[in-house]
Amino acid sequence: MSTTDKYYNQIQIATSYIKNIYDGEIKVALTLGTGLSGIKEDIDLLHTIPYGEIPNFPQSTVEGHEGHLLIGTWHGVNIMVMSGRFHCYEGYTAKEVTFPVRVVQALGIKNLWISNVAGGLKAEYPAGALILIKDHINMMPDHPLTGMNDDRLGLRFPDMKEAYTQSWRDKFKVAAKSIDIPYHEGVYVSLQGPSLETPAEYNMLHIMGADVVGMSTVPEVIVAKHAEIKTLVCSIVSNVCYPPEEISETTLEEVIAVAHKSGDQLKKVWEVLIKEM
Ligand code: HPA
């Protein structure tokens, strides 16, 4: 069997497993970043599926990341929540990291909302700020679309002009303004990690035109674009990385604490958007 057929079959098997549990139409899939699992508290859960039970699904290895796929309704809208995600720094390839996005595609879900925590590269971004992502710079060493292209999954050379769907960004802005939640709009740069960046690296990323830096999301967004899934991505600034004199040592505990606090604001914006669906 070719590598593409093998991967395609793995996606179909995982998808069938989920469809056997729930076969309704799901409008949005949400990916919850580090420390952001609180977002799921308001959801009326129908099914909680541990990642470990889904054939071919990777497993979370990181503190602050659960490993559950949740299906439920939020204000009457059917949603699926991926509570816990995968990163290349865990040793996964970019293809493995994005396997859940392929399952979203195979389930026929057309919208993917992603949250993450990230380092802030602009002087005006305090810890806790919400940054609506409008574009990215990919600096990861692995890419999810290398190898033979599977035409069943998407185009060989997917365009990336609008990887972050304009209509979702427009709606996010209106929603945030309607409930007075401040946000900025910015560019996300992805590095593999797991070490954080040095002050010189943060400075370089700032000069390069990035507004926040993180270790996730970009592979998922590339695959979503390949799969013609609409995306909405919001980062929460967990640590200030610019200007250099504002950088302090960062621990995972601090990152999670900030995420818990500001995750609530992001949840409120998502809630407005869900109510409009
Ligand atoms: N660098 C990379 N990823 C991150 C950071 C950072 O400073 N903060 C949260 N995720």
Image (cartoon, helix red, strand yellow):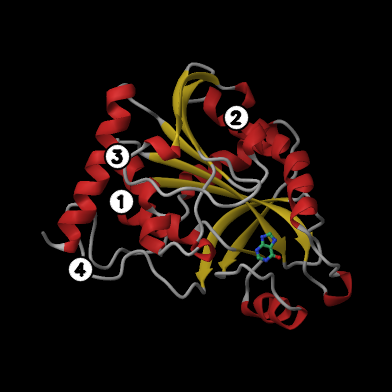
Look at discs 4 and 1 and give the one toward the viewer: 4
Mark 4 vs mark 1, CA separation in Å: 16 Å
Task: Look at mark 4 in the image and give the residue it sits on.
Answer: 148
Q: Which element type, helix, strand or loop, lies under badge 2?
A: helix
Q: Observer-nearest residue: 5 or 44?
A: 5
Q: Observer-nearest residue: 97 or 230?
A: 97
Label 1 packing within 10 angstroms: few (<14), some (14-19), many (20+): many
Identify the residue at horizontal 79%, vertical 45% (top origin).
257
Task: Look at mark 3 in the image and give the residue it sits on.
Answer: 14
User: Which numbered disc flags the more N-terminal residue, 3 or 4?
Assistant: 3
Mark 2 vs mark 1, CA separation in Å: 25 Å
Kind of residue at badge 3? Ala
Task: Look at mark 1 in the image and give the residue it sits on.
Answer: 227
- The vertical placement of 194 against 111, above or below, is below
- Position in image of residue 243 (x %, y %): 82, 73
Kind of residue at badge 1? Ala
Mark 3 vs mark 4, CA separation in Å: 21 Å
Mark 4 vs mark 2, CA separation in Å: 37 Å
- Position in image of residue 169 (x %, y %): 54, 46
Task: Look at mark 2 in the image and give the residue it sits on.
Answer: 40
Identify the residue at horizontal 13%, vertical 62% (top origin).
2
State which image quarter holds ligand 1. bottom right
